[in-house]
């Protein structure tokens, strides 16, 4: 049965769906400077839609579900949703800003297999400046509470001008809190599809080096990029054991590729090549059933709560979905050149699932 996953890699039709990213809600209790989703009225995914998706997991051989948002823990029934997917044998991950972890800690055991927590700073002051809420200590306490239940925790840091100097300290803070892995990605400053209805105030304004004017300040300057490279080189020595153990998910070379990305944003070189096959192994389902091949590409269809037929299985290979997969694979989607969160799984990885 696992070999069926490989059929996804030989064409543009999906025969299985290894990963589903589920936007349980588009409300959020953070006020991040890099995301606009919190500006929208909050909606929660209908439980009938959740059930229709869960029913198709076996037929689609779903291996992972990532519960996301918005802030997934604001959905009033998120633990029930998580357990429903676990009942289907699906490895269930919760992506959260961590603000509700301590309050809802009793709901986590038996509901999720792994928790991914946004940790964008090493100090309370920087955290508040980036996330828009004074909650650094609350998040750290939440991480410790999750680890006390022996649930794996991964922290995810979005690198940007306000925090890139704190990368070493972020690793130290995460390690002291007991996390299993620390991961980094670069801030996205150009994609209009991801993280809420972005850049609406700039739609009639020309881009600056390909960036929305309101986002230019979220990119690193030339001197910042040089400083980031120096920080990465220092980390490669000081945190050698953490790189070797896998505590830091990305290698020093991959962190340098992130510096290359920031350099390319300001015209100092080309964007690093992106290796990604996410549209061939995953699908994002938004709160209203809108389907996307990944975070950064446009929608190709929509599920409805009242769908009785295997709507997801049928929708995965709609003409629009096939066209998007063919386009990104042939290099025709400009969003992919600047992707900050590529996902790639080759034949060996798919066979091991």
Image (cartoon, helix red, strand yellow):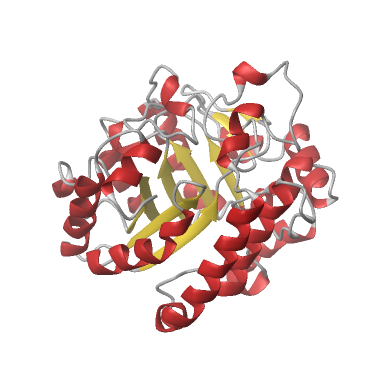
- Give residue 144's position: percent from left, percent from top: 19, 59
Q: Residue at x 36, y 51 (%)?
A: 121
Vertical order, 74 against 90 (above or below): above
The image quadrant that residue 89 belongs to is bottom left
- Give residue 163's position: percent from left, percent from top: 44, 51
Q: Is residue 288 left or right of residue 319?
A: left
The image quadrant that residue 171 belongs to is bottom left
Vertical order, 115 against 232 (above or below): above
Q: Residue at x 16, y 46 (%)?
A: 102
- Give residue 18's position: percent from left, percent from top: 55, 55
Q: Is residue 258 left or right of residue 87?
A: right
Vertical order, 288 against 24 (above or below): above
191 or 347, nearer to the observer:
191
Asked whether the viewer can see residue 2, the reply is no
Asked whether the viewer can see residue 26, the reply is yes
- Give residue 95's position: percent from left, percent from top: 38, 47
């Amino acid at each position: 049965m696992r070999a069926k996953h490989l059929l996804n890699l030989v064409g543009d039709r999906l025969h299985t769906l290894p990963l589903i990213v589920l936007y349980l809600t588009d409300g959020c209790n953070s006020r991040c400077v890099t995301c606009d989703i919190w500006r929208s009225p909050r909606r929660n995914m209908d439980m009938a839609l959740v059930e229709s998706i869960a029913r198709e997991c076996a037929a689609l051989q779903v291996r992972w579900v990532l519960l996301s948002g918005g802030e997934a823990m604001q959905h009033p029934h998120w633990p029930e949703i998580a357990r429903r997917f676990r009942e289907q044998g699906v490895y269930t991950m919760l992506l959260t800003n961590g603000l509700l972890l301590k309050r809802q800690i009793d709901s986590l055991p038996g509901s999720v297999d792994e928790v991914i927590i946004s940790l964008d700073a090493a100090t309370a002051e920087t955290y508040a400046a980036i996330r828009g809420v004074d909650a650094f200590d609350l998040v750290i306490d939440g991480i410790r509470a999750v680890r006390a239940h022996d649930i794996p925790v991964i922290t995810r840091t979005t690198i940007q001008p306000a925090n890139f100097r704190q990368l070493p300290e972020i690793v130290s803070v995460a390690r002291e809190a007991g996390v299993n892995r620390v991961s980094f990605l670069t801030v996205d400053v150009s994609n209009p599809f991801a993280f809420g209805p972005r850049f609406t105030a700039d739609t009639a304004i020309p881009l600056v080096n390909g960036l929305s004017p309101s986002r230019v300040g979220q990119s690193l300057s030339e001197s910042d990029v040089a400083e980031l490279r120096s920080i990465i080189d220092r980390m490669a020595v000081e945190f050698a054991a953490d790189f070797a153990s896998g505590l830091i998910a990305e290698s020093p070379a991959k962190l340098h590729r992130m510096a290359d990305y920031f350099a390319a944003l300001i015209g100092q070189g080309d964007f690093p090549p992106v290796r990604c096959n996410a549209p061939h192994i995953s699908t994002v389902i938004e709160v209203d059933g809108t389907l996307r091949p990944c975070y950064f590409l446009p929608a190709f269809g929509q599920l409805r709560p009242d769908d009785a037929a295997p709507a997801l299985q049928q929708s995965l290979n709609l003409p629009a979905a096939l066209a998007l997969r063919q386009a990104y694979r042939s290099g025709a989607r400009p969003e992919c050149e600047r992707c900050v969160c590529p996902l790639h799984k080759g034949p060996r990885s798919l066979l091991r699932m």
